[in-house]
Image (cartoon, rainbow, N blue to C red):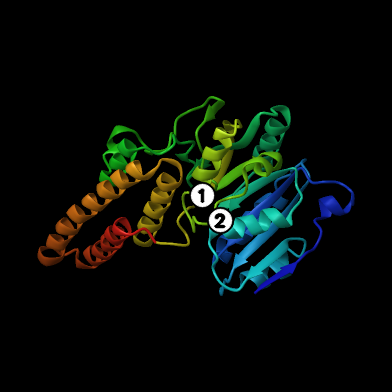
Amino acid sequence: MENILTVANPTIEQNPGLTPDMSIVLVCWNNKAYLEPCLNSIYEGGLRSSFDIVVVDNGSTDGSQAMLREKFPEVIIIQNDHNVGLGKASNQGIEAMSGRHILLLNNDTVVNGPSLDAMVDFLDQHSDVGAVGGQLLNADGTVQACYNDFPDLVEDFLISTRLGEMLRPGYPANVTDKEVRSVDWMGSACLMVRRQALDTVGLLDEEYFIYGDETDLQYRLKKAGWKNYYLPQVTTIHYGGRSMNRWGRRKMVYRGHMLFYQKNYGPLRTLALRILLGSLSLLKLLVWGMAFLFSAKREQAKKEISSNVDVVKLCWSLA
């Protein structure tokens, strides 16, 4: 069951026939504590671009809906009765809105008006650009991520073994670039996409429950001739990982990788990825099994063992 409550944004209400510069799409699942400051940062950011906001709630039970209706009555709410996944929920939000550009925004972010205006301006000034993003910052102001290359087997090996972190801070994301540049892909914690580009390549692939959908979308954009641009002046605080612990997240991240390979790279490279990730997880099972038997880290070992068993099963049969 889906119930849609529609209330006009004040910036649009003043100009009833105006298409907003951007429609902001947030997906929420039991994250009320972060959703409220996120929305406050938008409304208090001094935006000169016109906008409207939709929150797609994936069956939250923490009072998110009541908070929205009480404190943000101008926000459009799409209510799902269960967690339908990030990709599908984002698409629901996109399809319900009419902005010239779509801002995909995580609810555990704090944005600033000049950055969002800069994204709108860049898309308006560069008709060949399909998506723009910027720097994601930790709460202390340090850089979390800027942009990434499309996945490959070497990168996945370096991520899985954590050797990449020894080679470059923030690996696999680039976290040091200060130049405007065309890139492969950026995280969807704060990503603005031209609606015309979405009309060309389609919406997010809903087979990705979470993780991998933004990479897939920007891969399709580049294949269709659109450019994805990183803007260093665009900054967003992103708390990250608030809906899922790292052990549960591991399986979903790997599932997203495998789906991306399966869809875009073909069966041989997908098989190689499964063998790589499955073999490394088996090795980790051995290490954490020893830790469970002979160290004081039994609770952590139990979680690591369970997580790596999930990955092995996933590699055997993607589901």
Pick the residue in front: 155 or 302: 155
Circle 1: is it few (<14), some (14-19), or many (20+) Cα within 10 Å? many
Give the total number of marks visible in the rendering: 2
| Residue 171: percent from left, percent from top | 37, 38
- At label 1, the amino acid type is Asp
Image quarter where the N terminus lies is bottom right
Q: Which residue is mark 2?
A: 87
Circle 2: is it few (<14), some (14-19), or many (20+) Cα within 10 Å? many
Residue ranking furthest to the left: 294
Among numbered discs 1 and 2, the one appearing first in the sequence: 2
**Image quadrant where residue 113 sits:** top right
* Image position of 158 (left or right of 13): left
Q: Which mark is residue 213?
A: 1
* Image position of 295 (left or right of 112): left
**Image quadrant where residue 151 sits:** top left
> Is residue 35 at all visible to an observer of this figure?
yes
| Residue 244: percent from left, percent from top | 43, 62
Residue shown at the point (55%, 52%) measured from the top left:
205
Image quarter where the C terminus lies is bottom left
| Residue 170: percent from left, percent from top | 38, 39
* Image position of 35 (left or right of 244): right
Assess whether mark 2 and mark 1 are in contact (beta carbons under 8 angstroms): yes
* Image position of 109 (left or right of 314): right
Residue ranking furthest to the front: 267
Q: Is residue 98 above or below residue 222?
A: below
Pick the residue in front: 249 or 231: 249
Residue shown at the point (82%, 50%) measured from the top left:
11
- At label 2, the amino acid type is Gly
**Image quadrant where residue 66 sits:** bottom right
